[in-house]
Image (tube, grey):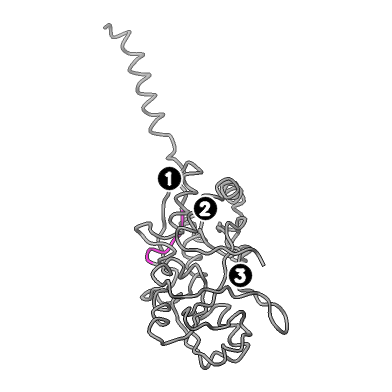
Amino acid sequence: MKLTTLRPILVFLAVASLASSMQPAQAALRVCADPDYLPYSNRAGAGFENKIAEAVAKALGEPLEYTWENTRAHGGFPEFLARTLDANKCDVVMNIPYGSREELTTQPYYVSSYVFIFKKNKNYDIRSMDSGILKRIKIGFESDTPAEGGLKMRGLVPAAIAFDVASDSAQSPVVMLNALDNGQIDVLITWEPAIGAFLQQHPDLEVVAVPNARTLGSPEQYAFPMSMGVRQGDESLRRRLDGVIAKQQPELTSILSQHGVKLYPPQ
């Protein structure tokens, strides 16, 4: 082939190669998550937040990337958000109360509740935080939660046992169920998604939702709609995530159910 014929081909190939190398990398769904806090998330991708993130990334047609950070370090979840989402290291958290003041939230994709958990053979008549039996049995609760607030309001905290699962990365929520098994406590009050995945190993336990209603005074909140959260001002990503939630809600609900997250109607 003559050089004069070959030269345009070589120029074309060079330009095409340069243009290809200058193409921006495909945008990823950058998720902030805890590397070791099952049943929520871990590096192996075994938590329900991991599975929700995978489903959302697939629906968006984007690869999934994680920024790992301990949600249970000093400062708790707000500090986790400050070090990750607010620091622009990632773009979305998969599990945050709807309407949170800390971040911009999507439409809720599930509603769950705090629950009472006790052995079925005890036959406790527990229907609310005002049930009289709670004054006569040993209560366990997760600290720094609405459950603690409700117990404190009724003067029940001094005789109860607090579990610091959400602030101690060395502990698994399983320790609270173990306390029921060994008789350390008679009833546990905690957020159902925190222990739902482990309840399959405890068929002897009864689970009763804590109602928002109250015998006297203003209602209390124990059921919460949960959303995905993005940085304040990131309306574009929120709209895209809302679109995924609307279209993929059956799949998201199935993932939650498979991981033991019990869903409740809004109260």
**How far apart in space, not on screen, are marks 3 and 1 (Cα)?**
33 Å
Residue 95's x, y, as percent? 52, 61
Residue 9's x, y, as percent? 34, 15
Question: Which numbered disc flags the more N-terminal residue, 3 or 2?
Answer: 3
Tell me which corner region of the image, top left, top right, bottom left or bottom right, holds residue 39: bottom left
Q: Amino acid at mark 2?
A: Leu
Q: Amino acid at mark 3?
A: Ala
Q: Which residue is identified by label 1? A: 63
Helix, strand or loop status at disc 3: strand
Q: Which residue is identified by label 3? A: 223
Q: Which residue is identified by label 2? A: 252
The stretch of residues the image draws in magenta is: 31-36
**How far apart in space, not on screen, are marks 3 and 2 (Cα)?**
19 Å
Frontmost residue, 201 versus 35:
201
Viewer-side label of 3, 1: 3
Viewer-side label of 1, 2: 2
Question: Which numbered disc flags the more N-terminal residue, 1 or 2?
Answer: 1
Farthest residue, direction top: 2
Quadrant including the C terminus: bottom right
Residue 59's x, y, as percent? 50, 44
Helix, strand or loop status at disc 1: loop
Query: On the picture, is 258 further left or further right than 98?
Result: left
Image position of 143 with respect to 202: above or below:
below
Frontmost residue, 236 versus 240:
240
